[in-house]
Amino acid sequence: MTYENPNLILPTTFDKSETITCKSPSNIAIVKYWGKFGRQLPRNPSISLTLENAFTKTELTYFPKEKADKSISLNFRFEGKENEAFRSKMVNFLESITDIFPFLYQLHFEINSMNSFPHSSGIASSASSMSALAMCLCELENRLFGTLSDKNKRVQKASFVARLGSGSACRSLYPVAGMWGELATEKTASNLYAIPFADRLHDVFHSFHDDILIVSKGEKAVSSRAGHALMEGNIYAQNRYEQARNRTQDLIQAFEKGDVEHFGKIAENDALTLHALMMCSEPSYMLMRPNSLLMIEKVREFRHETKLPLYFTLDAGPNLHLLYPDEFVEPIQGFIKSDLVPLCQDEMWIADKVGQGTVII
Ligand code: PMV
């Protein structure tokens, strides 16, 4: 399936103009996607929790274009200011999906995007921004052509398009949790788009917390794109992909049973596996910082002493994501504030939790 559709062409008399606004969150993978092939296809399945407070809001306004030529006409503002680097990335992305949305050549666009979190906070915005943009485009297609009136179909196509922009973005569309990537035991799972997963999660996970502790706000030394590419030469790659498939099956069972302890063990192990893969790639690199390790030790000590279910995971970066059930918010946030926040850069942290996915507002 490619979603190519040469029929999505506007009549030459088209003269409408309108703004579409979309809000879309980031997500945190529990079993990670790391390694890809083809046009952004994952080497292994992944499952993530959808976040709530770390989001991108994208306003897309379209106008009829004077002359329909083969170029993308776009003014792009990030948080109200023109940003040429972002604009040029977005033009390239829009160019790359004109087989899916041929009408992109027929319109002029003004896009304004903002993040709920500071730009230089070390929080990747590609998942939230790409899912927001993809949803705007599918909403636009439906308003212009009426071709995506079925909500499930609209969201699935948005997930497909988001994936082309940034793999992990395809999981952000869905409330609570999303699964992306084929797995023998999950017949509806696909490499092409993520599927909704909320129904498979025990109640305890529907109000889970993810507090993000900012260890370093700096740009990463090695991008995710380069990291995925290095997996192709990593001698552990095949074992990793098999492990990820097995872990995904285990994680699904933990989700269904409400087994927080098993969930936490998988989350921590998979985060450390991701970083171990970075350390043993050629060339080797490290994204954890000394305070990431210090915090990991403190979290494990706290868990041992209090028996409270507090677990960590990491993205491809130094920041710690702390996962725990809502029931324990008071003692755990008390510990975070007294013991971990002093280790954060500028004491920065974001209290987040499981959220409702992408919405048009
Ligand atoms: O979506 P990308 O290409 O930026 O890759 C991100 C991969 C991880 O965040 C490290 C893991 C994941 O599954 O989200």
Image: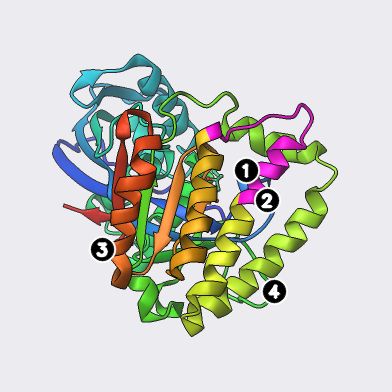
| First in sequence: mark 4 vs mark 1 | 1
Of marks 4 and 3, the one in the foreground? 3
Query: Is the C-beta separation of discs 1 and 2 under 8 Å?
Result: no
Mark 3 is on which residue type? Glu
User: Mark 2 near mark 3, Cβ–Cβ under 8 Å?
Assistant: no
Could you say whether the residue bearing mark 3 is in a helix, strand or loop? helix
Residue carrying label 3: 330
Between the C-alphas of marks 1 and 2, the distance is 25 Å
- Up the image or down, 327 lies above or below 21; here it is below
Marks 4 and 1: which is nearer the front? 4
Callouts 4 and 3 close, C-beta under 8 Å: no
Question: Could you tell me how far apart the alpha carbons at marks 2 and 4 are, in whole angstroms?
Answer: 22 Å
Left or right? Give the position of 148 relative to 6.
left
Task: Look at 57% across and 73% down and name the residue there.
Answer: 262
The reply to whether the residue tagged 3 has its Cβ within 8 angstroms of ligand 1 is: no
Of the numbered discs 2 and 3, the one sitting upstream in the chain is: 2
Q: Which residue is mark 4?
A: 184
Mark 1 and mark 3 residues within 8 Å of each other at the beta carbon = no
Spatial separation of the CA atoms under disc 4 and disc 3:
40 Å
Q: Residues within 10 Å of mark 4 (few under 14, many from 20)?
A: few
Q: Which residue is mark 1?
A: 39
Label 1, label 3: how far apart the Cα atoms are: 44 Å
